[in-house]
Image: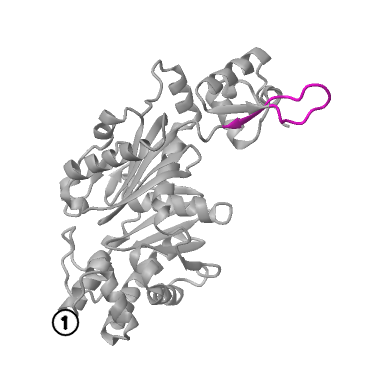
Amino acid sequence: MARRSAAPLASSGEVLHLIRAGEAVTRADIGRVTGLSRPAVALRVSELLDRGLVVEDTEGPSTGGRPPARLSFNARGGVVLVASLGAGRTQIAVCDLAGTALSTAEVTIDVERGPDVVLPLLMDTWESLLADLPAAQVRGVGLGVPATVEFAAGRTESVRVMASWTGLVIPPIIAERFPVPVFVDNDVNVIAIGEHHAAYRGEVDDLLFVKVSTRIGAGVISGGQIMRGALGAAGEIGHIPVRDGGGVLCRCGSVDCLDSVASATAMLRVLRERGRQVSGLADVVALVRAGDAETMAVIRDAARKLGEVVASAVNLLNPAVVVLGGDLAETFQPLVSGVREVVYRRSTALATRNLRIEPSRLGPGAGVTGCALMVLANILAPEAVDASLSAAPRATVF
């Protein structure tokens, strides 16, 4: 086992990182890897044990005599509260420190009703879920919202898309009730994080996740990391204009955006204009099963327009896989097939040589997983762990 310089690994946060990664699982391992003295190792391990971040047992291999105490990360040493807001459906959960959902709920709520309605509902639901988890130590909160988010500040920017949220700084509002670190990102970004980690980690490092639902957006994984852009606006493919859009005004104020002509909302609008009685996707599914030619034509047209925009994204980003998720992609296989056909025809031969285009493997649960991972990546970073250990108050227990 290689020895590292003690200076950069002198903190308890760095020791926790080594234990989580499996690079050091005994006190002796930590000493060899970091060069820290035995008393220094003991101090750091004691801090982690006291805060419930690490547990130990005596099952480690023995070289003769008493076996060494084996250290492992304690995924049950706290919980994170997460929620993935969609335009109409919200997934809410309490997860452990490995990102596994311990308790979940799903609510149907129109986010356009505004933060004064939505945020109290979220927080009340979290408290209800926590009631089933006695003495759960809340260590962080993560939220995905259907809007452009200035990630570092947790500020939403979504003029005419989610107007009542525009400019809102969400973390301080949630922190009033749950005084722990709060992180907010775009809903498709957290879904992309969850999908990549749970279904593609170790398989591909470059992934484009496209959500096709009430609205359309994308999350970009590049080099294994989410790409947010300078101000959090990366992946807004829903507001790329398409040809033959018919002059439809988009929520953003532009005309013929992909979101306004190929989303579920657009599909329902077009079918109603053509005389079909549809109130939701269930009605569209019924028409497809009945072999309604007009409905199939609308789906094919949406697939063509979506495919043309995704083809441009493939040429620009060169992902290894394009994942199609959201209600439309999960409901209509012809949509996925249509997008695949257009992308292979319109993108460059090199970009599509090994490209895979497939439906989501994780489904609706990807948002919850992604939110949890977003929080854990921040609160379990060595510098964050060190800051929490040095702070006098401990994370709040609910």
Residue at the right extreme, as displayed: 64
Under tag 1, what secondary structure?
Answer: loop
Image location (x, y in percent) of residue 188: 36, 54
| Magenta region, main secondary structure | loop
Residue 358 vs 123, above or below: the answer is: below
Residue at the top extreme, as displayed: 39
Taking depth in this image into account, of 125 and 150 the one nearest to the observer is 125
Residue 344 vs 232, above or below: the answer is: below
Q: In which image quadrant can residue 82 be found? A: top left
Magenta span includes 64: yes
Q: Quadrant of the C terminus?
A: top left
Looking at the image, residue 16 sits to the left or right of residue 319; the answer is right
Q: Which residue is mark 1?
A: 275
Type of amino acid under label 1:
Gly
Image location (x, y in percent) of residue 296: 31, 82
Image location (x, y in percent) of residue 232: 32, 46
Residue 65 vs 130, above or below: the answer is: above
Residue 366 visible in image:
yes
Looking at the image, residue 8 sits to the left or right of residue 306; the answer is right
Q: Which region is colored magenta?
A: 58-73
Point 66% across, 27% down: residue: 57
